[in-house]
Amino acid sequence: MAELRQFVGFMLAQEHYGIDIMAVKEIIRMVDITPVPRAPIFVEGIINMRDKVIPIVDLRKKLNIRVSEHDESTRIVIVNIQTRMIGLIVDKVEDVIRIEVDAIDKAPGTSPAIDNYVSGVARTSKCMVIILDIFKVFSIQEQMALDSLS
């Protein structure tokens, strides 16, 4: 039997993405976000969730994808990156995707910046899914900047 991996599937600009389910703490609806002065450009601000301050990142801005207005499908995916929780704004959360390991191809060598955090591209019966390595999306400096917000 082929080994399966599970990902939380979501959409950004009509493209399908996935993050390893083990990194995802929870998914919430959009809430009011408190802006933080002089935060990195991709940081929308912070939220208070159960007495924890969580920095919120617009994943479109971080991945250099055209930004759009939020709507009723917009969600915040709370992820655990080492010891920090970060909220990622995505256009829409889909289902948990189960993908056989041999259906995941190595990321095409498009650019060194992308190769750092795209761990592969998966073929499913419905679409292609870009698999993000959420632990590599933020540089050490960016992680330190996010730490200073929480």
Image (cartoon, rainbow, N blue to C red):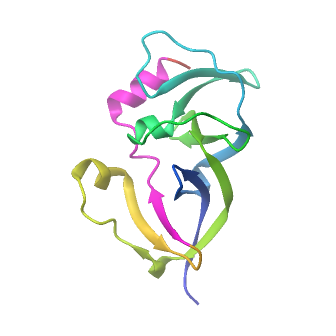
How many numbered markers are drawn?
Answer: 0
Q: Where 78 falls versus 108 (above or below)?
A: above
- Quadrant location of the N terminus? bottom right
Q: Report the residue that reaches farthest toward the top.
A: 37
Task: Tell me where residue 104 appears, x and y as whole percent.
Answer: 44, 74
Residue at the spot x=42%, y=42% of the render? 65
Which residue extends farthest right?
Answer: 50
Q: Image check: 31 left or right of 112?
A: right
Query: Residue 138 in magenta?
Result: yes
Is 60 rendered above or below residue 46?
below
**Residue 52 location in percent, x, y?**
68, 23
Q: Which region is colored magenta?
A: 127-148
- Vertical comparison of 77 with 131: above or below: above
Q: Residue at x 74, y 20 (%)?
A: 51
Task: Answer left or right for 106 relative to 150.
Answer: left
Whether 48 is drawn above or below 16: the answer is: above
- Which image quadrant is residue 78 in? top right
Residue found farthest to the bottom: 1
| Quadrant position of the C terminus in the picture | top right
Residue at x 66%, y 22% (from the top left corner): 47
Residue 129 pos. (x, y %): 50, 65
Frontmost residue, 13 versus 8: 13
**Which residue is at a point 27% across and 47% down the rendered structure image?**
113
Task: Determine which quarter of the picture holds residue 132.
Answer: bottom left
Magenta-drawn stretch contains 146: yes
